């Protein structure tokens, strides 16, 4: 079968090549891939900066945003041929830490987890893949190709789950306003879930007058391009989805009292600012503010995400997929173009 592979640590090593059928050891369920989403993590792996092959193997099958149809499944596993499924990315570490032991591998404490298409396990960027029943999530049939958004949506489902857990530290917690920074797929899915919670949603992004702005407005949100004017907003919640150091600095201390800042974007080290820690600390202490980071998602979050996608306006969701590229032209999908929101590689119907 054909698969998109890379040699981890080697830049520009991605290729479409013939590899053996997926081994039974990957799981009892055989899935035929229909689509694969591409994200920043994939591009980091392509640049050679990130990712590792399964032990003893020369290559890594790329891809962690999966979407496929079940071809074969053992009886009574909860899935039958024809079901639409998405594969969970992370697997718990071999000697589970206290988090992995209770199914919260997204909270792994020793870093020895593995991840399909990223760390020590082949990804979903092959014509067929195998998966364990407990790591396959069944999708609403009506969702169709939009199922490829489930993995990125699971990241936001977790971010919302944890934000609400933190919020419940106060019995009177009733947030009204949300600011999302960054109108990429992650930011727009954060905004969608904010709207689904009845919040007044503001989204900040650099791009003016394009599809991102239109998507935010069509969702019912307010679009901003000037970060300097946001200080007057004082939102109850901020979801920081850019990882841009200057913007993160501007977010700190910028919420209303009892505010929560959820850091979702990953950034590189090396950007150093002068920061009035005394003022920031006084604000955060006296206002009961919270700042936390979040990554990855466990099975419960995938299920919450599937529910959120099923309840969303399907035509709005479909506009998040700005390019569909056939497997034959896979390398075009990996190029980062300015108008892209989510790019998807189509493997077949
Ligand atoms: Zn663990």
Image (cartoon, rainbow, N blue to C red):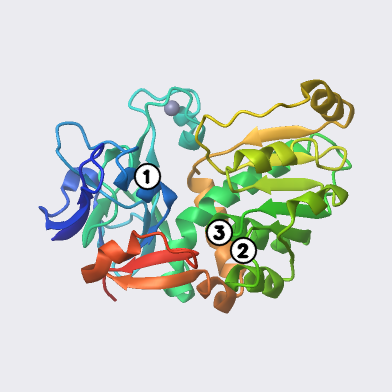
Q: Secondary structure at mark 1?
A: helix
Q: Position of residue 270 (x, y in %)?
A: 53, 29
- Crowd rating for badge 1 (residues with CA inside 10 Å; few <14, some 14–19, many 20+): some
Q: Which residue is disc 1 drawn over?
A: 44
Distance CA(mark 2)–CA(mark 3):
10 Å
Q: Secondary structure at mark 3?
A: loop
Q: Which mark is residue 207?
A: 2
The disc, 3 or 1, on the residue closer to the chain's N-terminal end is 1
Q: Quadrant of residue 253?
A: top right
- Crowd rating for badge 2 (residues with CA inside 10 Å; few <14, some 14–19, many 20+): some
Q: Position of residue 159 (x, y in %)?
A: 62, 45
Q: Looking at the picture, does residue 140 appear above or below residue 186? A: below
The disc, 2 or 3, on the residue closer to the chain's N-terminal end is 3
Picture quarter with ligand 1: top left
Question: Are the residues tagged 3 and 1 within 8 Å (C-beta)?
Answer: no
Residue at left 23%, top 37%?
Answer: 53
Mark 2 sits near ligand 1, with its Cβ under 8 Å away: no
Residue at left 34%, top 64%?
Answer: 333
Question: Are the residues tagged 2 and 3 within 8 Å (C-beta)?
Answer: no
Q: Position of residue 196 (x, y in %)?
A: 70, 63
Image quadrant containing the N terminus: bottom left
- In the image, taking residue 183 as reference, residue 137 lies left or right, namely left
Q: Quadrant of residue 165?
A: top right
Q: Which mark is residue 177?
A: none
Q: Is residue 33 visible?
A: no
Q: Looking at the picture, does residue 325 appear above or below residue 126? A: below
Q: Which residue is disc 3 drawn over?
A: 184
């Amino acid at each position: 079968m054909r698969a998109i592979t890379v040699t981890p640590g080697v830049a520009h090593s991605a290729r479409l090549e013939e590899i053996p059928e997926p081994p039974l050891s990957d799981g009892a369920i055989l899935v035929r891939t229909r689509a694969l989403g591409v994200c920043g993590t994939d591009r980091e792996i392509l640049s050679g900066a990130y990712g590792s092959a399964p032990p003893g193997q020369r290559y890594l099958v790329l891809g962690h945003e999966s979407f496929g149809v079940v071809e074969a499944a053992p009886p009574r596993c909860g899935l039958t041929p024809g079901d639409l499924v998405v594969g969970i990315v992370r697997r718990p570490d071999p000697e589970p830490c206290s988090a992995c032991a209770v199914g919260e591998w997204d909270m792994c404490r020793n870093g020895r987890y593995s991840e399909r298409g990223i760390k020590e396990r082949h990804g979903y960027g092959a014509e067929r893949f195998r998966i364990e029943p407990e790591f396959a999530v069944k999708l609403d049939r009506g969702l169709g190709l939009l199922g490829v958004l489930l993995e990125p949506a699971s990241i936001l489902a977790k971010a919302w789950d944890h934000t609400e857990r933190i919020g419940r530290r106060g019995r009177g917690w009733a947030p009204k306003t949300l600011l999302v920074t960054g109108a990429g797929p992650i930011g727009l899915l954060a905004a969608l879930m904010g709207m689904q919670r009845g919040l007044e949603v503001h989204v900040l992004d650099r791009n003016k007058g394009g599809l991102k702005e239109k998507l935010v407005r069509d969702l019912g949100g307010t679009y901003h391009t000037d970060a300097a004017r946001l200080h007057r907003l004082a939102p109850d919640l901020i979801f920081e989805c850019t990882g841009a150091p200057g913007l993160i600095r501007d977010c700190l201390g910028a919420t209303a009292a009892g505010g929560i800042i959820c850091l979702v974007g990953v950034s590189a080290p090396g950007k150093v600012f002068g920061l009035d820690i005394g003022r920031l600390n006084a604000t955060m202490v006296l206002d009961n503010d919270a700042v936390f980071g979040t990554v990855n998602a466990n099975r419960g979050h995938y299920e919450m995400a599937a529910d959120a996608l099923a309840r969303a306006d399907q035509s709005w969701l479909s506009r998040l997929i700005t390019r569909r590229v056939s497997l034959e032209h896979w390398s075009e999908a990996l190029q980062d173009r300015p108008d892209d929101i989510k790019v998807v590689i189509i493997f077949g119907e």
